[in-house]
Image: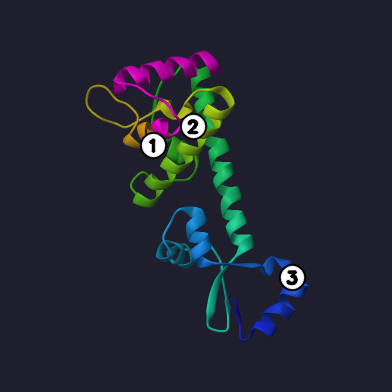
Amino acid sequence: MRFETLADYMEAFSKNPDLAVIPTPLVAEHLGRTPPAVTAMIRTGKLDEIQIGKNKFIALRSLMELEKAFQRQVDIVEQYLRDLVKEGRRSVFYEPIMTKVGMDPAIPADRTKIGEILGEVSRRSMKRDGVLLSVLVHRKSAGNTGPGPGFFKLAAELGCSWTDDNAFVEEQTELVVKKYS
């Protein structure tokens, strides 16, 4: 959406508060991304841009919708993982989880986003229940499977400490099973 002057924008905003804007650098900071990454989100339709004169902004409404969509995906993944535990499962690979929220493991941006979703799932479960629910999500590999490096980084950020990754995964898995089965 484009307005030639600030006066034009102000008049439109007075009639439609959905036209509230926020600067791109602030959106980038909030999302933990770079301004060029936010610009790419505009190009792909994930965020809406409002131009006032020569200045470009993000429509606050579109950022709020993006946040709500993210929280819905977190809710879906969290429930899916809890259901797996109730079914007696102790691990799952990324692909079925990604499919559940409309993502493709072959797309790098989707792989990044599922990591963000799983991080939020574990932040929630740690705050509420003292467990890291995303411990159940494993990378495909020969032999023993386990969570990716993002899981261990988040666990450390949340105050967990351990000396052996495999033992830590087993311990967290047991806690999750005990809590949610």
Of the two numbered discs 3 and 2 on the same chain, state the one appearing first in sequence.
3
Of the two numbered discs 1 and 2 on the same chain, state the one appearing first in sequence.
1
Question: Which circle marks residue 95 in the picture?
Answer: 1
Q: Which residues, given as a range, are shown in magenta?
A: 154-181
Residue 168 vertical position relative to residue 42 in the rendered view, above or below:
above
| Magenta segment, prevailing SS (helix, strand or loop) | helix
Mark 2 Cα-neighbour bin, 10 Å: few <14, some 14–19, many ≥20: many
Residue 114 vertical position relative to residue 82 in the rendered view, above or below:
below
Residue 111 vertical position relative to residue 33 in the rendered view, above or below:
above
Q: Is residue 162 magenta?
A: yes
Residue 139: x and y in percent read 32, 32
Q: Which residue is mark 3?
A: 16
Q: Which of the 4 image quadrants contains residue 148?
A: top left
Relative side of 102 to 52, left or right: left
Residue 45 in view, yes or no: no
Q: Which residue is mark 2?
A: 122
Dot in front, 3 or 1? 3
Identify residue type, mark 3: Asn
Residue 43 in view, yes or no: yes
- Residue furthest to the left in view is 142
Tell me the distance, in whole angstroms, between the alpha carbons under discs 1 and 2: 18 Å
* In the foreground, 81 or 147: 147
